[in-house]
Amino acid sequence: MSAEFGGRSGRQGRISQWLRGRRPKEAAGDGGREGLLLAAAAAGLPLAPAAHPAGYRCSCDRVGCPTPARHPVSFAWQTQCTTDRGQIERWARHQPQANFITATGLVHDVLDVPLDAGLEALERLLAAGVEVGPVAESAGDRLLFFTATRGTPEDEDEWWPCELDCHPETMDEHPGLRWHCRGSYVPVPPARLMGDLTVDWVRGPEHPLPDPLSLLEVLTDACARHAGDHTERLAAWPHRR
């Protein structure tokens, strides 16, 4: 790997500042919250209502909620998720405080990485001319790379489990790269989390979804670098059953 990316070069720092500086403007979007949700749905991301902050607690009122303001409100979220414009408009208007999640593994997956590693990887990918899809910042400490899914219910042979598969309630087991696929979900921008944290687009849903394998090597390399371990690389490449 080029020594250019061994540390924070001046160019890398400038791009990071540019990325950070453009997020608030993109988060505002055209049409506000509802417009951003409809844009995500129009891009094919299936949505469902999620919990939201209610003072110092999660709106679900669950004592010790493990993922406050980050989880769907219905146990049937996998079948409830939709891209239907009319349904999303009704949800957004009748539940004005609600966040929304998008189910992964149907149309798209999400590669979820620590913020600093994600910024380094994003800069490298863009500089190399690699097609990068939508990217969101979550809670100020993670970047979410939206990609095409590696498998769908209609194509079971193209879906396989690996050690990177992650569900939000078990995400602490994946401190580096987390791969959200079948049976998982992530908050979709715009979302308000606990402690005035947010989920916002860095690159919007108008960008086409790339093949996840085109991003994976750079993402895992950046995660290993920022973990301070250059000798132990994550076994990132999935293996078929």
Image (cartoon, helix red, strand yellow):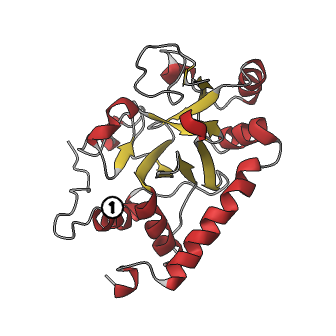
Q: How crowded is mark 1: few (under 14 residues within 10 Å), some or many (20 or more)?
A: many
Vertical placement of 59 versus 190: above or below?
above
User: Which residue is rendered at x = 39% and y = 30% of the image?
Assistant: 183
User: Which residue is rendered at x = 55% and y = 33% of the image?
Assistant: 194
* Farthest residue, direction left: 231
Vertical placement of 117 versus 194: above or below?
below
User: Which residue is rendered at x = 30% and y = 68% of the image?
Assistant: 225
- Asked if one can make out residue 45 in the rendered structure from this viewpoint, the answer is no
Left/right placement of residue 165 relative to residue 37 reads: left
Vertical placement of 119 versus 114: above or below?
below
Q: Quadrant of the N terminus?
A: bottom left
Left/right placement of residue 121 relative to residue 159 reads: right
Q: In the image, what residue type sits under mark 1? A: Cys
**Quadrant housing residue 54:** top right
- Indicate the position of residue 107 as horizontal and vertical percent values: 51, 40
Left/right placement of residue 102 relative to residue 222 reads: right
* Farthest residue, direction right: 31
- Asked if one can make out residue 241 in the rendered structure from this viewpoint, the answer is yes
- Indicate the position of residue 95 as horizontal and vertical percent values: 71, 20
Left/right placement of residue 149 relative to residue 177 reads: right
Which residue is labeled 1 in the image? 223
- Indicate the position of residue 221 as horizontal and vertical percent values: 31, 67
* Farthest residue, direction front: 56
User: Which residue is rendered at x = 69% and y = 62% of the image?
Assistant: 22
Q: Quadrant of the C terminus?
A: top left
Vertical placement of 199 versus 4: above or below?
above
- Indicate the position of residue 71 as horizontal and vertical percent values: 50, 26
Camera-nearest residue between 231 and 129 = 231
Secondary structure type for disc 1: helix
